[in-house]
Each structure stands twice: as structure tokens, then as C-alpha cells.
Amino acid sequence: MFFILTSCSSHKKRLADRTHTDTLSVAQPSVETNEIKNPYYNVNFQLDLYKKNISFYGGNSVSHWELFIQKDSSFTFELNGEKTVFEFSKATLAQDAFVIRYHSKKVIQTTDTAQQKKSITITLVEQSSLEKASISYLPFSVSVTINDQATSTTYSGGGFYVSNPGLHDIWVLDSLNNEKADATKFPEGLPRLEFHLDGGKLYGFSGCNELTGRYYAIQDEIVIKPLASTMKFCVGTIGESSFLDLLNKNRFEYSIHNLRLTLRHRDKTKLVFKKVD
């Protein structure tokens, strides 16, 4: 199915009126009321996680539990206000599907001394999960199993990796596979992407057609889900197909440096964008 979209120019104007710092600190989500109850749609919540070096957040608002993975530091599990912090351990990755597992046997902080002998097993599955309270989705399904000497309890919910807030901006194509973007191949304007932290929303322009879709982060990678596009025909826009061919590879390692966003595919192809001032 194809959807006809409006131009991103209004988004660009709103962001252009802010400094880069303002964009990261005061940006507010534009979402439906039910979505804002979902932490994945709450920009300020995500910014707070990023400042605390939280790489992954999981939870279930109905069951009243939360999981915070602080990269290379700890796993924090909170249930009904009670907090247990486990020592960080390296992840294991399943071969046949995107499944990440962590296991830790060492409690480094707890409000209950009886919990000192507990262990935690965390399973993250690259599969969307419905957040029932808000009737909206998170990109990962999460399972947390807490074991002690007598019992084993598993908690299920959803979660997401915390994106670099620098993504929350408009990026114009700078180069494809180390070749400078040729404006003569894009007479309607150079392609651009506009990432939003709230709900992983993604808007774009392919040089002729408007794009819309979703993305989510996996550590230092971005997964761009299949994009909907308008069906406009533009004379002379011969670079659009090359741009879309690269973008449709979906999964990229990403980095932000010197106001440049680089999307690098595992086959060594890459797209580089520059931040819009």
C-alpha cells in the first residue's frame, strides 16, 4: 500500500528555528494521547535514559516492572518499587534469529538482603511487543527471569534500545558510496531523512517522492523498516533509484561525527548525510 504524504518543509522550519542543543533538550513528542503513555513515545524519558548511560529499557506497566541495562555496568530490575541491581555480563547472540541473552548471578545492590543469592536472565527478541496500557508497540519483546534457591519467576513485556539523541534532526544526502551527491541527478532537491525519537518515526524525501516509516536502534545499528512512498514521477531525477536501493537494505551500522550521519551496511556500501542547519 502506498500513502501520499505532505512535505517535510514544515518539520525542517521548526527544527531550523532551534539550536542543536535545544533540539535535544526540549523537543516534545507529537503523538496520540494513548501513545504518550508508552515510554518509547516519550522524548524526554528517552533523553533521561541516554544521560544515565542506559542502553536498553524494558518493562510492563500492567505488571509494574522495569528493566534498565546500563552498558558495561549493570542490570537494574524494579518490581513494585523494589530495586535489585545485578552485575553486568556479556551478551550471547542466537545464530538463527535476533535474540540477545544476558545472565548474571551477582547482586551488587538490593533493598532486601534475602535477595543477595538471586540471579537474573534477560532475553531480548527483535519482535514488536504490544504495550497494553497504551495500546501501542515497542520494537522488542522482553523476558526477565528472576531465580533464587527456591523459585523462578518470569516477567514478560516490551522494550527498546536507546537511540543517540543526535539522530533527532533532518539530514540531507552528502554522498553515496564515497561519491559526492550529484545535484544534477536530483533536480527536485537532494534526498533527506528526518528521524524522530518519539516512536521511531521516520520521514524522508528520495529526490522525487516523499517517504514515511519507522526505524529502531539495536546498540550501534539502525533498522529502517519498509518505507511507504508517494508515486510521483519526476523528469530527470535519475539518482532516486540508486538512493532507494541503498536505503532499502534496511539494517545499518550508524555513527554521528562532525555533523555527519553515516549509515554503513555490512556489504560495505554506505550513505552519508549532513545535518541541516
Image: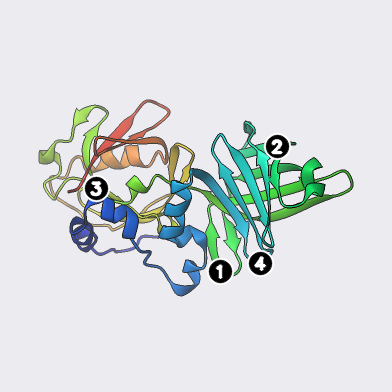
Q: Who comes first in sequence, dot 2 or dot 1? A: 2
Q: CA distance from mark 1 to mark 3?
A: 31 Å
Near mark 1 (Cα within 10 A), the count class, few <14, some 14-19 or many ≥20, is: few
The residue at the point 40 percent across, 60 percent down is: 1
- Does residue 57 show up? yes
Classify residue 219 as left or right of residue 133: left
Which amino acid does the dot numbered 2 rest on? His
Corner quadrant of residue 116: top right
Q: CA distance from mark 3 to mark 2?
A: 41 Å
Q: Which mark is residue 192?
A: 3
What residue does disc 4 label?
62
> CB under 8 Å between callouts 2 and 1?
no
Q: Nearer the viewer, mark 4 or mark 3?
A: 4
What residue does disc 2 label?
103
Q: CA distance from mark 2 to mark 4?
A: 25 Å
Q: Who comes first in sequence, dot 2 or dot 4? A: 4
Q: CA distance from mark 1 to mark 4?
A: 12 Å
Which amino acid does the dot numbered 1 rest on? Ile
Classify residue 231 as left or right of residue 104: left
What residue does disc 1 label?
135
The residue at the point 27 percent across, 51 percent down is: 21
Residue closer to the observer: 110 or 67: 110
Q: Who comes first in sequence, dot 4 or dot 3? A: 4
Q: Secondary structure at mark 3?
A: strand
Q: Secondary structure at mark 2?
A: strand
Q: Secondary structure at mark 4?
A: loop
Q: Nearer the viewer, mark 3 or mark 2?
A: 2
Q: Who comes first in sequence, dot 3 or dot 2? A: 2
Near mark 2 (Cα within 10 A), the count class, few <14, some 14-19 or many ≥20, is: many
